[in-house]
Amino acid sequence: MSETPVPVRPVGSPGAGRVRPAPGMEDAPVPGGDGEWRRSFVDDFGALDLVPGMPRASMRVLGWLVVCQPPAQSAQQIMDELALSAGSVSAAVNALRADGVLERVMRAGDRRAYYRLSAQGWESVLQARLRALGAVRQAAERALQESQGEEDHRLSELRDTYARIEDGVAALLCESRAEREDGASAAEGPTPLVGPA
């Protein structure tokens, strides 16, 4: 995934010459006391099998980027907060970026990379779940074709149940994508000189 440059003001506009931070890069204060609820959420989230085959460390990183402040975090910030090794954090952010869940952004005057949830991140999670559902249905279909009538109702019920769930998730994914695209169109303003690559 390509890096997201920070937009700048057109020359001659108020504040020209200053580079604004990308959305989510602002140094917002952390509300809510000592953030114990954040740590509890990260632990709960890390135990979920939300993305098939994803290691617990990666799920904890994803959970942290759902609740952290500011929303974009450097690898060092993630390591410090979650007590994970550099290798674990690197593997996690690389895998999540490859799946389209996270995006990498740069900060003006800072050579470090920061990571935040991408706009289509949860759709990517649903797509992963959809692929897993489809794999179960396809396995059942292959068995039905090869069984030559030896199977009983259990195999066909497995196929039909997963087919219905697969259809439902696919419909939800289409609805989510349409809502996101409609919202993005409504929120569009003047085109910045430098935008997402």
Image (cartoon, rainbow, N blue to C red):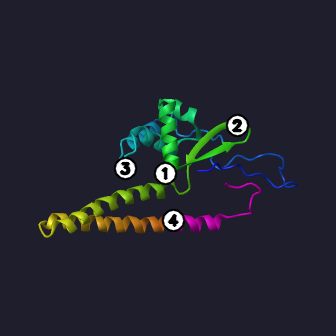
189 w.r.t. 3: above or below: below
Contact (Cβ within 8 Å) of mark 2 with mark 3 = no
For the point 25% across and 68% down, the residue is: 160
Name the outermost residue toward the right.
12
Please indicate, yes or no, whether residue 25 appears anywhere in the rendered image.
no
Residue beneath disc 2: 110
Decide which of tag 2 and tag 4 comes sooner along the chain.
Answer: 2
Residue 115, given in percent of the width and then of the height, sits at: 58, 43
Give, as a three-letter code, the residue at label 2.
Answer: Asp
- As measured in the structure, the alpha-carbon distance from the residue carrying label 2 to the one carrying label 4 is 33 Å
Q: Which mark is residue 52?
A: 3
Give, as a three-letter code, the residue at label 3.
Answer: Pro
Decide which of tag 1 and tag 3 comes sooner along the chain.
Answer: 3
Q: Residue 99 carries which label?
A: 1
* Quadrant that contains the C terminus: bottom right
State the residue in front, 122 or 135: 135
| Mark 1 nearby-residue class (10 Å; few <14, some 14–19, many ≥20) | some
Residue beneath disc 4: 177
For the point 34% across and 62% down, the residue is: 134
Q: In this view, does 174 lie to the left or right of 187?
A: left
